[in-house]
Image: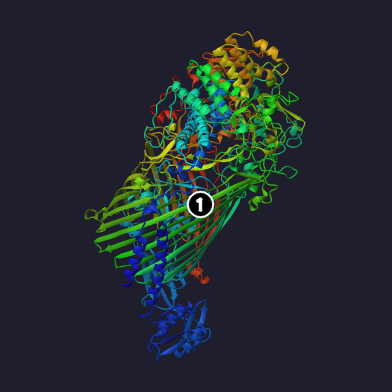
Amino acid sequence: MEHYKYAGIVSLMILLFSVTLVAGAQESGDVYVSSTDINSKTIETVEKGTSLQKVLSTIENTYDVKFFYKSELLEGKTFAENRVILFQNGLFNLLDDLLSDFGFRYKVLTHRTLGILPKDSAPNQEINLETVNGTVTDASSGDPMPGVNVLVKGTTSGTSTDAQGNFELSVPSLQDTLIFSFIGYETGQMPINGRTNLDVTMQPQAIEGEELVVTGYGIQKKSDVTGSIGMVSSEDLGEQQSAFNALQGLRGKVAGVNIFTNSGAPTGSNRVVIRGTGSINAGTEPLYVVDGVAMEDGIQYMNPNNIESIEVLKDASATAIYGSRGANGVILVTTKRGDTPSEDVAVSYNGSFSVGRLASKMDAMNAEEFMEVQRRGFENATLFEDYPPGQEPVFDLSDDIGTLFDEQGNPLYDTDWQEEVTRTALSHDHQLGIQSGGEKSSFGGFLNYTNNEGVILNNYMKRASARIVYDASPTDWLTLGTNLRVNRTWENSVEEGGGGQVVRRTMVEFAPILPVKMPDGDWSHFNDVKFTSLEGQPNPVQRAMEEDRLRDRVQLFGNAYAAFQITDNLEFRTQFGVDNTNFESRDYQPTDLESPESSVGSAGMNNSETTYWQNENYLTYLQDTGKHRINAVLGASWQERSYRSNGFGVRIFPNDFYRTNNVDAATEVSGFPNSDTWDWSMNSYFARGSYTFDNTYSATLTSRIDGSSRFGENNKYGFFPSIGVGWTVSNEEFMSDMDAINRLKLRASWGRTGNTEIGTYQSLSTISSGSVLLGGARQNTSAPQRLANPDLEWEKTTQYNIGLEIDLFNQVVSLEADYYDKLTDDLLLQRPIPSTSGFDVVMDNIGSVSNRGVDFMMTTRNIQTNDFFWSTTLNFNYNKNTVESLGAEDEDIFPGPNWVSGSQTILRVGEPIGNFYGFERLGTWGTDEAAEAAAAGRIPGEAKRSSDRKIIGNGLPEWTGSFSNKVNVGNFDFTADIQFVYGNEIMQQFLHTAEDRQALTNGIATQLYEAWTPDNQDTPIQRIRHQPLSGQNTQADSHWIVDGSYIRGNLFSLGYSFDQGKISEYGLQRLRVTASLQNAFVIHHPDFKGHDPEGSSWQGNPNTQNIFFYQYPKPRTFTLGVNIQF
Amino acid sequence: MKKFILVFIVGFLTLNSCDNFLTEAPKDEISTNQLLDSPETVTGLVNGLYREGRAADFYDSGFGGANVMFGGFMSGFFDNEAKGERIQGQVAQDLTLDPEILNQFFDGWWSGHYEAISHANLALQAIPDMEGFSENEKNRLLAEARFFRALNYFNLVTSFGDVPLITEPVEGLDGLEVSRTSSAEVYNQIVADLDWAVNNGGLADAPFPDNNFRITRGAAAALLADVHLSRAGYPLQSQGSYADAADAARTVINSGQYGLVEHGSDPMTMSAYNKMRTSDVDDEFIYGIEYDGNIASNDFPGQIIPGDVRPAGITFGRTFNVYRPIEEYTWIYDPNDDLRVQEKQLFYSSLERDGTVYEFNEWAPYMWYEEDVAFESGNSGDRDLRVYRYSEVLLIAAEAIARSEGVTNEAISYLADVRERAYWQTDRSTIIANLSGLSEQEFVEEVWKERLRELPLNFKIWTDIQRTRQYPVPSENNPGEVNFVDVVGASNNWGQTYQEHHLLYPIPDDEIQTNPALEQNPGYN
């Protein structure tokens, strides 16, 4: 195995070495002035008869300048003798020398632009450039087009058309080429060819058809593709300028791709589900492939501005090329390279500044309301417990008078902790890009710095990233390139999971009668309240400000490839990719966080490193005869990922100075230091052949053989085939009369993909070791971890897909719809086994889950006139998920979270994944039911519940989608993106402590205003009960459940692009400013009491979507952005 | 041509593979086949038993209380202030036990026990052939493994009745569906394991702390006495078991290693109970759960202070009274004569700190109170939890001898030993005189009362109700007197009536669903 590891590296080195030799040997031939490397060039000989124009063009390249002149001026000017040019003398000496021979002189016009004129012309004579004019019209309608950008190729000079579509432009020579561009139209190039008047027609951008699609291991014409692939361009992603996270930009853009943004934090985890949840224990995230390299972790930290396009592979015909890792869908990310449209240096700067504010607040009680609950809780205490006469609890504020209450018992403070712990988050983002494209090589350099603040105090994510891309084609048969990215992030995170005393909870529950800081300057603590005993919660502001939860990451990610054109049709490509991530977390809790008594200061540090490499080699065969088109791929892949980590914790610090910087200042080790390591490897072979006949009939066969170390000895390799067919009906003879239908294509596919995402060593029976206390010291302990299962193999998903693509009425309406039917069987399931075996579960291939649904996407171009363009896109996904079978006995599985009443979700055959489980709250016991209530051990006003637990909701939506509108008016563009979710529920776990349980903490106002009283008996909300005095009555029940449907104003953005003609005077090619508003509004069910109807406090458990115990509130963000290109 | 050679070289190098590229070789875990080569791993397997299964029931705590408290909640005499946070406390008081509602609770209990049993089975299989152990070491480890297998089966059989009896390691996926074995057979296996441990284990004869907190011969014999006592009662009422219980108890007593802790100079502050509360080393300690604040800390100190009391300077963020004896329980004691019911002996109802008195207005266990933990170190209780004390062995002996041999002087003296220490102002002769001349049933009921008074924090109340089918009814007007009535038909202190099926717990629903060979206990379908 070891020797293989290095084989890839060695081969790469040999390859690069050989390439250098070959490239060197190639340096001769008919190139007149061979090199543009100014440093290596000193002297050049120009042969007799060479034209001056040719020499000047060499000089242009050498010095990166541009000459403007009248073409007739240089006509017939050739060198009469061989001549030596001395480059080392500098440009101006050279020109003086050279031009005087021909009776010319030069004049500096702008930076890097020089005019050439007759020597005897007046010193300040205007340079008469050639003038070209013309009209630009729409190819389909014939209407003139205003605002079209016109650019001289290879220069920064240009203009744009006027209201009548006319333009006039000065060009250095009538041999130049003009570039025409306009949003929604294909960019065109037009050589002037000596003309002075050019009439140009522009083609609306082909919506389908000629578009190219990135598929795994290649690029295909969209018209040939038989699979279901969603595409998002960099423009679509970039709309959301303040989306620091690439996944957020993808939200709502592709039907069938559900992105649950379960937190409002800068690094808030996004959960991506493509076409439903197909797995229970083996992971539901899609496979991310960035420039051909699998990225397991880190997509959320990637700079979204580096992305050129994202393709989402959904059906088996598209995903089978990724075999055992394709079952959850594949997201292919293609990053920007160095090439530019004008084959010149392009420098761009994108910057944004955004302001975020809490979009919603929970209805936490104020000080007065809080005290009313306390008072009534004391009053009601005797209802819940018998007290000997005279020993009833007394509501007595005397110990707190002067500190928290005035003499009359009125609270001195009324703190809104949601306000105190949040802020107006100010974030900024800077992107600098340099792209330099040439005929033989291109270079790109991209720098980014982002400071993204969360709305919770002291919560931030900063990112600095640098990326270098280089591509070269030294010969006509060799292309090679490399792409390396360094991504560094710093983060101070807020805990988003579980049910602890964290800020997202205490911002609602901390007592409003406490100030942020006591008058003596110390943080207030829960035990500053004397008249009752409150839950031991840390002051939320103190926690946010003084606790460290630092998360630093350095990711090195990149690849290098070489492609050999063996024949005209056959290419061999080898690619080596690496992903190395170093992660460090440093946690520190200060010495008086909870209270001066109980906190001692504690620190914990963890380091981990993940190293991944892959080597892929494949042959691509392309043949296009017009009638027959073949695109075939055959290759092999090796990959290995290894991980190691170590961590430790210490406690009891003398003060808060050292934090994690000097952990040896602590006096105790908490827990035991730990370390961990694992690795896994895969070896695969893949093939794909696609054939299109007459642009009408297409078929694609794909297969992959995957071997994985994670599986049992008996099942190391798996085979994943797929077939797809496409029929472009509109190309048939019989359709030629149907003018309304521009394009109609039908697709169908079948295939099988897999899922390997389980932990390592699951097929082996292993013994793990640790230590236990025995005899006053740690003694070693060991325990078997699992039963061996040498037959363990892939989870398999069989998917059928039928698709329809149609363009109507001159592409006014474009529609794409897919129906899919996915059955995942041989689930990698932690199958429950009788625990009399000593084990509760065994990892086994058993059980199945189905997902059936529809992806739908329709774009209409409602208005297309010269100065007004309006299009609307509606996309949605409907998905029905069903657990078809489970373990050997189809037994119920309770996957947690185990909280309050046991598992709050259930997996049951015939039901979908993500079902909530709990009691039904039938209401509250009434006074006329007192006897009945007493028999059940209750009193009137307590919750009345069903005797059994049942399924009470589901967190995964049936319908998700988005509705977006784009309008261009003149130089303005406007986008409105509305997203919707329908057919799911939310389990509001926070009602446990915010409403059901009273007086131990603060809660929401319904516990006071809608509580049961003898006069208000028709309510599900229980009578006020003072928890510290009288205990509580809470269970996970249907009262916590609320409809989870919502409509979100996801993005409204307004942009203005300046006329190119005007900005070119300042040396700019593009200047665009934008203003946008994200998360403008959310319409949800009126009974929902949380911050945002999308969330999960139990990330990592795929069953827990929309189950939350408080949330990191999402901000409403206003962003100003600028986009400049030089 | 050049380029073809190049492609060939690259292709050759990259497509070359090797056979073991996909082999998994864990570096942080040992594969099972290596286990049989390593004495350390086998020792580790036995070491783990000290904190698994039944042992973990004592410390697996939190809002719901330790598993071992569930019997106290079933009896209706103990309440958990935090019961609203976890379902089991409320369900037990309400007698609404249900295999589905308590599925996760009982499944954790059931599978935890079987996990410990499977580790014991693996150790018992591996040890005899293991190189690198002396015979003595082998026997000691075998005896420890058998002790824990017995301890776990004993709790399973008293909790659930007939349970699958598995004594060999499970190695594959075949034959996992095992049906229930009769309780009698399970008891046979338990007794066989403990007999072996007592007679063949070569275990040390010493109090638990003196043997470095490893199982002693006395611990095995004490457990065996308890097992026989239980087998002699309902439901098996096995012939001869009282005599066997007496024999086993005498093995402990006659070893001469154990004794009751005596009161110090001030019987209130330095009582035997307070000495045991503040120290882990004494001759009364037979078997227990060891704690150390730095390695495995005892959570109980934070769970015995009512939540509405917040003494200044307390280090716990939140406290609650997890195992509150309700007022009726205190009527079991004679308030004048019995030291155990005095303030700050077994229980307390107020706390002094820096001169301030904090009244609880209720009772809470004092035996688990650690002042330095509550007010200084926080969350790191050090005191061990005693599972078997010598006083219990004396009471087992008294009951078993009375049942098998009659109310002999020996039986009387064992009961008197325990009562004498509690009745600190009463002469032994008076105590003996009061016990002499009682009928067998009367004497045995005196033992039962003494068990209620002496062992409330050793979690005996429910297993005593199960085996005797008698429910204790104390009297407010006549504290110290307890009537015993048939448990079936009796009402608990929360107004709920016991039915026969309540005497066994339901088998967890998960286990019933996974194993079709299992049948649910009657009354729970």
Dot 1 corresponds to which residue?
A644
For the question of whether residue A124 can be seen, the reply is: yes
**What crowding class fits label 1: few (fewer than 14 Cα within 10 Å), some (14-19), or many (20 or more)?**
some
Q: Is residue B412 above or below residue A509?
A: above
Q: Quadrant of residue B365?
A: top right
Considering the image in quadrants, where does the C terminus of chain B appear? top left
- State the residue in front, A95 or A531: A531
Q: Position of residue A447 (x, y in %)?
A: 52, 63
- State the residue in front, B319 or A70: B319
Q: Is residue A996 left or right of residue A904?
A: right
* Residue that appears at 51% across and 17% down: B241
* Residue that appears at 55% across and 19% down: B247
> Farthest residue in the bottom direction?
A81
Secondary structure beneath dot 1 equals strand
Q: Is residue A628 left or right of residue B398?
A: left
> Farthest residue in the front direction?
B135
Q: Is residue A46 left or right of residue B82?
A: left
Q: Is residue A567 left or right of residue A523?
A: left
Three-letter code, disc 1 = Arg
